[in-house]
Image (spheres, coloured by chain):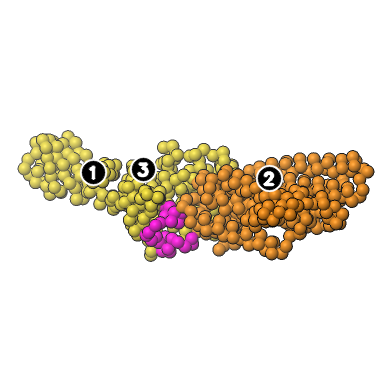
Amino acid sequence: MSAAVWASGLRKRYRRRTAVDDVSFSVARGELMGLLGPNGAGKTTVIKMLLGLVRPDAGEVMLLGRPARDPASRARVGYLPELFRYQPWLTAAEVLGLHVRLAGLTVPDAERRECLGTVGLADRAGDRVGGFSKGMQQRLGLAVALVARPEFVVLDEPTSALDPLGRADVRDLLLSLKERGVAVLLNSHLIGEVERVCDRVLILDRGRVAAAGTLPELLGGRELRLRLDEVSSDAERRLKEVGELTCTGEEYTVALRDPEVIPDLVADLVALGVRVHAVEPGRVSLEERLLGILRAGGER
Amino acid sequence: MSVRVILTIARLTLQEAARRRVLRSLAVLTVLLLAVSAWGFSRIDAEFGDLTSGEARLAAAMVLNLVMFGLSLIAALGTAFLAGPTLAGEIESGIALAVLGRPVRRAAILLGKWLGLVVFGTGFVAAAGLALLLIVRGTAGYWPPEPVTGLALLAGQAVALLTLALLLSTAISPMASGIVAVGLFGATWVAGVVGNVGVALANPGIERIGTVSQVLLPTDGLWRGAMRCFQDPSLFAQFGQAFEAHPFLSIAPLTVPYLLWSLLWVLIVLALAGVAFQRRDL
């Protein structure tokens, strides 16, 4: 099966400023890919090029197996733009109806209502969009992105106007999309969100791909930090069995190959007479890694 | 290109006109104009009872054209200010992003908008124009020789102007596109009057101003053709002098080549709008 999106060598210049420079990536079917990067890194421009809203100066895009130049390639694509509005003179239900018609589908009323229900707008279906708050418009935007039974959903800052509860809803929504095998490209400033739900991450910096990969690839393996005393040489040997060991005083850090070994390791250490004060599994956070990548890029 | 998309967008455009109170404000303006003209026509009859029947018909034809001009102005302003914001405004506000993210061609969206506006403008001219003609018949007993052709030409004028506003709105801001379109419309009308003065003075240089402007933007040419349809043809034989350089009386009928040119002009401007919209980054 073809990728949800495949982009190769995308370039875009606005007058003298290069917005996007040689960006290539792909999102597999059913995969959740996060798009990260500082303001002005070219994330939204990349998204708009995927959807034919901005003409790339160079490069090629295939959407769900068809060249993106062909509007029909967007038939099964849902899109929530970053800066958007919906026709303020329409009701929420009418906006969904319009998008269903434009998508060339017939979606029964019950399914549309369910879609509004998913984003928490079930009781506002008959209200004009003009009276909606920014957060409610964003919820409606999510419903619009999801209503035409998409196989690939592009969400550009879907939580920027949402309260913490709304953000949690979006996270649940993303996970349910993943369960249904819908591919998602998620551009979000909320790194924690991306780290929690995404399979892979693409980091853009000044229009270029600064890093890309799965979270374990980007963040390295997990590690285990322990505070121990009365560590015998047997105990040290046992520690070295599970991974590379570094220690400073009472602090022992093991680079874990397999996190499943933790309970057995702790039991064995106790049996060997080690006094265990603390056991803390850890990982470099995506935020630390992102800042590292961006700073390294800035120094070059 | 999908007919479904074109019709969906045309319907949406009409819905917008209806819900955004454009229709209501136009209706209020039109009713005002019709009321004033009904009163005016009844006064012509009452105050100038001693006019010969020919003179009364001339006065009626002139005032009818004057009021029709007001009507065409309302139609032109209404559609130009609807057409201007429709594309540029939607691009600015981000409405266009969500719509164009769908499997639709931009040309289909543009054609849909154009079609919706054409239906709106034509419907307005037909309804308000017919109402005015009936008022004139009721009050002054005057019925123009070619009412249908005249109204069709008035509708053509509105279509030409809204197509121009649509082209402008692919390139410049919402307000500016409406203002520029209406400004050009006014300028062509003035150029047409100036050209008529040239005819009266037998000065080909001044006459050419009107001709050239009528070719560049056919609104004034169509308007003069419409006026001709609302005038009693016997008037020209009787009062030839009065027609010279008169802004609300027309001498020459429209030629078929000019009508064809107007049609081609609309198609060219629409095609240019399509190309400009297609190339635009959102």
Q: Residue at x 83, y 54 (%)?
A: B240
Identify the chain of the residue marked 3, using the numbered disc in the image: A
Task: Determine which residue is flagged by label 2.
Answer: B23
In the rendered structure, the colour chosen for chain A is yellow
SS at circle 2 = helix
**Closer to us: A254 or A188:** A188
In the image, residue A296 sits, relative to residue A54, either above or below, namely: above
State the CA–CA distance, disc 3 to disc 1.
Answer: 18 Å
Is residue A170 something that shows in the picture? Answer: no
Q: Residue at x 73, y 60 (%)?
A: B254
Q: Is disc 1 on the same chain as disc 3?
A: yes
Q: Is disc 3 on the same chain as disc 2?
A: no
State the CA–CA distance, disc 2 to disc 1.
Answer: 60 Å
Task: Determine which residue is flagged by label 1.
Answer: A299
Q: Residue at x 52, y 58 (%)?
A: B275
**Closer to us: B156 or B90:** B156
